[in-house]
Amino acid sequence: MSDILLILFLITLIYIGVANRLFTYISVLAIQGVLLFGIAFIELIEINTLNLIFVLLETIVFKTIAIPFFMRRVIKRNNIKREAEPFISNFISVVIITAIILSSFLLSNTLHDRHLQKMFFVVAISALFTGLYIIASRRKVITHVMGYLIIENGVFILSLAVGNEMPMLVNTGILLDIFVSVLLLGIFINKIGDVIKEQDVDFLTNLKD
């Protein structure tokens, strides 16, 4: 069952390559949160009940509800245009993201570690590089934050692969996830919109100390 959820997660990575609107990106992040909830519930059933509840609450409350809510608020408060405005066409983006996923499969086949769950590794690496690609190929600063959140989801998936043996690793990753995400969103809500009226990354080159 977890493999099906992981495949659905890969599909969301491809879909984000063709998304044109920022609210679509936010919806994809919310869907990924639901998928991570299901994966965590299936994979971490053997860990301490308190740790399991903590992980499940983080995926549902934080990744699925809180982050999408704050991202929508950031867009509306700062009057950011709803279009993602990529540097690269959607078709090429889909090709690149698909190539990332295929490369992750090929890389996983070169690794021979009995403790390594290859499907988790493939999805995690795909999410990491897709997030980096989103950061590099989108004009708006806020899409860079979304790319970073996709990278965090990839790290979370990688930690789930060893969650039963190392639950503290998962908890530590979650705490870092919450801290950094809230910090980034707080900066956007309180500062960025007041300083940068144009939400294009090209304008960041004009900032001075």
Image: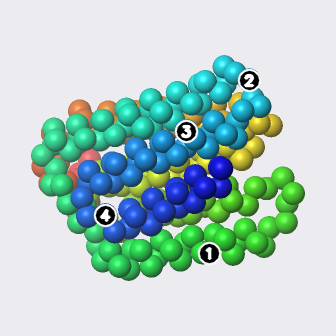
Q: Residues within 10 Å of mark 2 (few under 14, many from 20)?
A: few
Of mark 4 and mark 2, the one earlier in the sequence is 4
Q: Amino acid at mark 4?
A: Ala
Of mark 4 and mark 3, the one earlier in the sequence is 4
Residue 19 in the image: x percent, y percent?
A: 31, 63
Which of label 4 and label 1 is nearer to you? 4
Q: Residue furthest front?
A: 1
Q: Residues within 10 Å of mark 1 (few under 14, many from 20)?
A: some
Q: Amino acid at mark 1?
A: Ser
Q: Nearer the viewer, residue 168 or 28?
A: 28
Which of label 4 and label 3 is nearer to you? 3
Q: Report, in whole angstroms, how far the alpha carbon at label 2 lies from the one at label 3.
A: 16 Å
Q: Report, in whole angstroms, how far the alpha carbon at label 4 lies from the one at label 2.
A: 39 Å
Residue at 77% in and 31% down = 46
Q: Residues within 10 Å of mark 4 (few under 14, many from 20)?
A: some
Q: Name the residue tied to disc 4.
A: 19
Residue 181 in the image: x percent, y percent?
A: 43, 38
Q: Name the residue tied to disc 2.
A: 48
Q: Amino acid at mark 3?
A: Phe
Residue 37: numbered disc: 3
Of mark 2 and mark 1, the one earlier in the sequence is 2
